[in-house]
Image (spheres, rainbow, N blue to C red):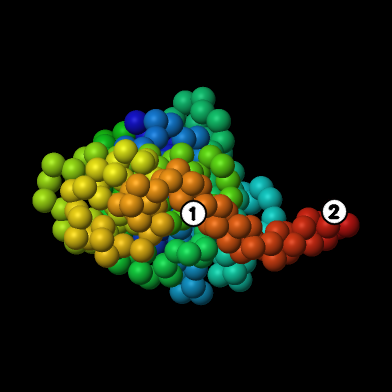
Amino acid sequence: MIPIQILRVLSTIRRHDVHALLMGGQACVLYGAAEYSRDLDLAVLATDDAVPALRAALAALRATVIAVPPFDVAYLVRGHAVHFSVPPDPDLGPVPPLRVDIMSRMRGVAPFDALWDRRTTIALPDPTREAELEIDLMALEDLVQAKKTQRDKDWPMLRRLVDASYDAGRDDAADADRIAFWLRELRTPEFLADAVHRFPREADASTRAAVVAVRTGGDVDTALAEEQRREVEADRAYWLPLRRELEALRRAARRE
């Protein structure tokens, strides 16, 4: 169940016509790969035309920036996350402030326009308005890509996301895109072996080392570990200049 404070934020975002996609732990909850997440992560359209609506929504929520960088389009475009704290609504009872992180650009993830075009939209009961609330989620394939970070906690979540997709769709007629997604992203060896067995033609065409290992009796675990290692190193390299910029901003803030 999505906490009421998060539904309030998403409802406000929707009412202000903000182009925002739910990602992170809350999106994983809705895709059936997590049980609970305390924070809210959003991918947003960061253009001069789009940001005023986002600013209006954040102002309506009385959101305040709680860390560097400041809320500026330039930082979002460069790949930074901007971190907010949203105070509780007194009418919703005694709940703690909600942390909301927004991003516009992520390593290895398509530009926002492409993310928006292939988004998933679901409807949930909105107890704050006694109606249904439509929520735009990052598509599963994009959410999986966004989870390929240097953070240890993201990799089990990534695995559960793809496992949930495969487990739910294994008895259905899968299209070519979904088969390709499973063979490209499955990280549980048993599920990957099952997919290779079910889709031999597609598996034979795959150059993914873990798929080749399944087909040839190789070491699947080692192939998966090496795959993860490469993604972690790429993420560290991507964030290195951004972290240096954040450190410079922190030093400047301490001097003020």
Q: For the residue marked with disc 2, what is the amino acid? A: Arg
- Tell me which label, 2 or 1, sits earlier in the chain: 1
Give 11 or 222, whichever is nearer the viewer. 222
Q: For the residue marked with disc 1, what is the amino acid? A: Glu
Farthest residue to the front: give it: 217
Crowding near the residue tagged with mark 1, few <14, some 14–19, many ≥20 C-alpha atoms within 10 Å: some
Quarter of the image where the C terminus is located: bottom right
The count of marks equals 2
Farthest residue to the right: give it: 255
Q: In the image, what residue occupies the spot 43% across and 31% down?
A: 36
**Relative to residue 46, is residue 182 drawn left or right?**
left
Residue 13 location, x and y as percent? 41, 53
Residue 183 location, x and y as percent? 30, 54
User: With respect to residue 179, does 151 lie above or below?
Assistant: above
Task: Measure how far apart labels 2 and 1 are at the Cα level.
Answer: 40 Å
Q: In the image, what residue occupies the spot 31% across and 45% down?
A: 192
User: With respect to residue 189, does 72 lie above or below?
Assistant: below
Farthest residue to the top: give it: 94
Crowding near the residue tagged with mark 2, few <14, some 14–19, many ≥20 C-alpha atoms within 10 Å: few
Is mark 2 in CB contact (under 8 Å) with mark 1? no
Q: In the image, what residue occupies the spot 58% across and 50% down?
A: 150
SS label for mark 1 = helix
Residue 24 location, x and y as percent? 46, 46
Q: Is residue 128 visible?
A: no
Q: In the image, what residue occupies the spot 77% across and 58% down?
A: 247
Write down the residue under mark 2: 254
As drawn, the label of residue 227 is 1
Foreground mark, 2 or 1, reads 1
Farthest residue to the left: give it: 173
